[in-house]
Amino acid sequence: MKTEKFKVGGMHCKSCEMLIKDSLEELGVKDISFEKEIITITFDETKISLEDIKKVIGKEGYKAE
């Protein structure tokens, strides 16, 4: 398991967080926490890459940096 922390632009409210959280949980991301525009996630890097996670966030309309 790997833990990463990065900025996600465009998140303004709890609904934004829930949308991202639901999408990432479908991919198997385990721990997801938000602090302002910072997201911390724990995931199995043998099943999904950080780049794929960022792409999913982008498809939801947010910018993962």
Image: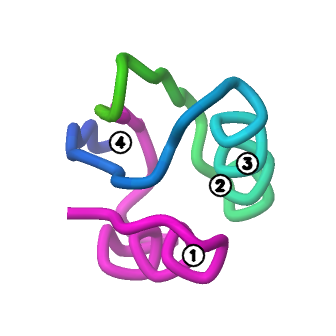
* Mark 2 surroundings within 10 Å by alpha-carbon count, few (fewer than 14), some (14 through 19), many (20 or more): many
Q: Are marks 4 and 2 in contact (CB under 8 Å)?
A: no
Q: CA separation, marks 3 and 4? A: 15 Å
Quarter-of-image position of residue 41: top left
For the point 78% across and 34% down, the residue is 15
Quarter holding the N terminus is top left
Between label 4 and label 2, give the one nearer the viewer.
2
Nearest-to-viewer mark from 4 and 1 = 1
The mark nearer the N terminus, 3 or 4, is: 4
Give the label, 3 or 4, closer to the camera.
3
Q: Which residue is mark 2?
A: 24
Q: Say which amino acid is labelled 2.
A: Leu
The span picked out in magenta is 39-65
Label count reads 4
Q: Around disc 4, counting alpha carbons within 10 Å, would you say few (fewer than 14), some (14 to 19), or many (20 or more)?
A: few
Which disc, if any, is residue 1? 4
- Say which residue label 3 marks: 25
| Residue 28 lies in quadrant | bottom right
* Sequence-wise first label, 4 or 1: 4
Tell me, yes or no, whether the two marked residues, 3 and 2, touch with CB atoms within 8 Å.
yes
Measured from the top left, where is residue 53 in percent x and y? Answer: 46, 69
Label 2 near label 1: C-beta < 8 Å? yes
Residue at (39, 71) in percent of width and height? 54
Estimate how packed mark 3 is, as few (under 14), some (14 to 19) or many (20 or more) residues with alpha carbons within 10 Å: few
